[in-house]
Image (tube, helix red, strand yellow):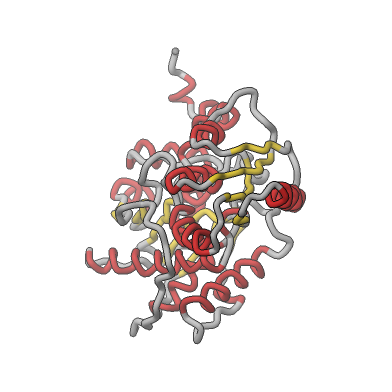
C-alpha cells in the first residue's frame, strides 16, 4: 500500500534524547501462540519516560512560544502524565503546579514522591470526579494568573491536538522501525485514558496508508462523557495541524472497556497474570493502573483467537505505580510465588 506523505513535525523540545526501540517478545510470543512486539516508550530517565513525554515535547515548545513560565496540569496521584510534566518543567526551568485527585496517601510514594522531588507545587484535592478535578484546576489557574503568573494550562494527559500529532509521528517512527527489521504489525494495542495517544496513532495509520488495527484499552472510563467522540475530535484537531486534507471518521476509533475492571486504578481480571508473564518471560515491568490492562487484553484476545499478529504492544510506561503500597498489595496477594517470600 502506498505511503501518504505529510509534514508531521511541530515545533518541539527534545526531552528524550533518543528513539525508543521496537523489539520482538519471543518468550511471550511462544506462550501466547501469537507474535508480539513491544514499542519501548517506557524507557528513559525516571522522570522523563512514558508516552506523555512525546506530547510534552510539543506542548512545552508551544508554551514557551506563548511566553508561559508556569505549567499547570491535573491528574490522579498515580498519574504518569503529571510526573512527566513535573520533570519536564524542571528540566527547562519552568514552574509547575499539579492538581491531583484520589485519596491522599499517608506518605508520598510512587509518582507522587517523584512529583515532589521534581519541585512541583502539589494541590491534593481528595477523591473527586474527573469533571470536578478540571473545575478545581481552572480555579488554580485563575489564582496563579491573579498573582501575576504566566500560566500554560495543560489538559489532563496532554489531551490536545498537538499531543495527538506527536503520536501520529510516533506511529510513523514505529512503522519504519519494524520495516527496518523486515517485519510489520497487524495490530497495535495500548493503554488509553485521556485519548491523545490513540487519536495520534489512528492519524499516523492514515498518514502511512496502513490498515493495522489500533486497539485502545480503556483504563479510565469516566474521564469524558463521550470517550470515542472526544478521541475522534483530538484526531481531527491533530490532522488539522499536520495534514489538513485528512479527515478521520468514527469508524477509525476502536476502544474496549472489557479490561477496565472496577475502574481507574482498581483491580481488573488478568492484570496480575499480565504483570507476572511480562516480568518472568521478558524482564519487562508493566503496572496495574495502565499498561498491565493492555497486556491482559493481548493475552485474552490471543487465547480466544480474536487478535491478528504480529501484535505491537505500545508500552506507554508507568512502572512507578508498583511502588505505591496500595497497588503493590494487590500484585503481591495475587502471586503465590511472591507471597511465599519471607522478608
In this rendering, the answer to whether 188 lies above or below 290 is: below
Instruction: Identify which residue, 158 or 196, lies in the foreground.
Output: 158
172 and 117: which is toward the camera: 117
Q: How many marks?
A: 0
Image location (x, y in percent) of residue 230: 65, 67
For image coordinates 46% across by 39% down, the residue present is 319
Q: Is residue 234 above or below residue 99?
A: below
Q: Is residue 177 visible?
A: yes
- Indicate left or right for 22 with 98 as reference: left
Residue 106 located left or right of residue 342: right
Q: Is residue 126 left or right of residue 61?
A: right
Residue at the spot x=55%, y=68% of the render?
A: 161
Quarter holding the C terminus is top left
Q: Name the residue located 36 percent from the left edge and 54 percent from the top edge.
A: 38
Q: Residue furthest left?
A: 181
| Residue 129 position in % (x across, y down) | 75, 47
Amino acid at each position: 500500500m502506498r505511503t501518504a506523505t505529510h509534514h508531521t513535525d511541530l515545533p518541539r523540545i527534545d526531552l528524550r534524547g533518543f528513539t525508543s526501540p521496537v523489539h520482538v517478545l519471543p518468550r511471550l510470543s511462544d506462550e501466547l501462540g501469537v507474535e508480539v512486539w513491544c514499542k519501548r516508550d517506557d524507557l528513559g530517565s525516571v522522570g522523563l519516560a512514558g508516552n506523555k513525554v512525546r506530547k510534552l515535547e510539543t506542548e512545552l515548545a508551544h508554551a514557551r512560544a506563548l511566553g508561559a513560565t508556569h505549567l499547570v496540569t491535573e491528574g490522579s496521584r498515580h498519574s504518569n502524565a503529571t510526573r512527566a510534566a513535573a520533570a519536564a518543567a524542571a528540566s527547562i526551568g519552568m514552574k509547575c503546579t499539579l492538581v491531583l485527585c484520589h485519596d491522599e496517601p499517608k506518605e508520598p510514594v510512587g509518582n507522587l514522591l517523584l512529583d515532589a522531588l521534581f519541585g512541583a507545587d502539589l494541590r491534593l484535592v481528595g477523591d473527586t470526579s474527573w469533571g470536578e478535578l478540571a473545575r478545581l484546576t481552572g480555579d488554580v489557574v485563575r489564582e496563579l494568573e491573579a498573582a501575576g503568573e504566566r500560566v500554560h494550562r495543560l489538559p489532563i494527559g496532554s489531551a490536545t491536538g498537538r499531543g495527538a500529532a506527536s503520536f501520529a509521528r510516533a506511529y510513523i517512527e514505529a512503522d519504519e522501525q519494524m520495516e527496518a527489521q523486515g517485519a510489520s504489525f497487524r495490530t497495535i494495542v495500548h493503554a488509553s485514558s485521556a485519548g491523545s495517544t490513540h487519536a495520534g496513532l489512528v492519524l499516523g495509520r492514515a498518514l502511512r496508508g496502513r490498515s493495522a488495527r489500533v486497539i485502545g484499552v480503556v483504563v479510565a472510563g469516566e474521564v469524558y462523557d463521550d470517550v470515542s467522540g472526544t478521541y475522534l475530535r483530538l484526531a481531527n484537531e491533530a490532522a488539522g495541524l499536520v495534514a489538513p486534507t485528512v479527515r478521520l471518521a468514527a469508524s477509525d476509533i476502536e476502544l474496549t472497556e472489557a479490561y477496565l475492571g472496577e475502574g481507574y486504578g482498581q483491580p481488573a481480571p488478568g492484570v496480575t497474570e499480565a504483570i507476572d508473564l511480562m516480568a518472568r518471560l521478558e524482564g519487562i515491568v508493566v503496572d496495574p493502573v495502565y499498561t498491565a490492562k493492555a497486556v491482559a487484553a493481548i493475552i485474552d484476545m490471543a487465547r480466544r483467537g480474536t487478535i491478528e499478529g504480529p501484535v505491537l504492544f505500545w508500552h506507554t510506561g508507568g512502572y512507578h505505580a508498583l511502588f505505591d503500597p496500595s497497588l503493590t498489595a494487590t500484585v503481591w496477594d495475587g502471586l503465590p510465588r511472591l507471597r511465599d517470600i519471607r522478608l
